[in-house]
Image: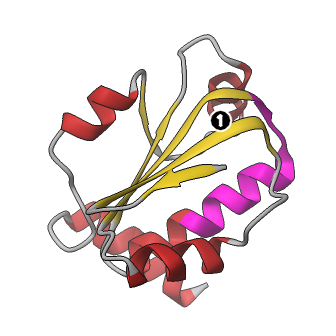
Amino acid sequence: MENGVGRVFVFRCHGCLDGNGASPEEIVRTATKQGARFFIIDATDAAYVDTPGVRWLLRLRALIENMGKGLRIVTHSKSPVTRNLQMLQVDIDRYETLATAWRTPWTTASNDRSLRRRAARNRAA
């Protein structure tokens, strides 16, 4: 994974989204130390996402939302990543391009009631 830091932290996944690599806790800690408020996973080059990768992604989303920050994923509509996320009914903001994910106004747990409820459920779990 490569990343860019600023207000938006971008992860570029090459290969597989399989949960191997940096832990969600490590990623969030590093990004927030550098001032990131929003997170984008660019999985356009990822070959697939498997079950451990989905668990990793859900853990990352929970950490980010519990802090009142936002997470988006970029995948092509016909990619295996998109197909697996849809099949497993993973509720995450998905975009076709990095540019669209970047430019679209952000909704976070701090300003969206449904996200605040989901963040509360995450904390309770």
Q: Which residues are magenta?
A: 47-60
> What residue is at 30 percent from the left and 28 percent from the top?
99
| Amino acid at the residue labelled 1 | Leu
Color encoding of the figure: secondary structure
**Quadrant in the rendering for residue 69:** bottom left
Is 63 a magenta residue? Answer: no
Nearest the camera: 121 or 94?
94
Left or right: 111 with respect to 58? left
Q: Secondary structure at mark 1?
A: helix
Name the residue carrying label 1: 85
Question: Residue 44, position in %: x, y?
Answer: 58, 26
Looking at the image, which residue is at 80% across and 62% down? Answer: 21
Looking at the picture, tell me which residue is in the foreground, 62 or 46. Answer: 46
Q: If the image is split into quadrants, where does the C terminus sit?
A: bottom right
Q: Residues within 10 Å of mark 1 (few under 14, many from 20)?
A: some
For image coordinates 62% across by 30% down, the residue present is: 86
What residue appears at the point 37 percent right and 81 percent down from the top-left corner?
Answer: 67
Query: x and y percent of residue 87 in the render?
Result: 70, 30
Magenta segment's dominant SS is: helix
Compared to 63, does 74 lie above or below?
above
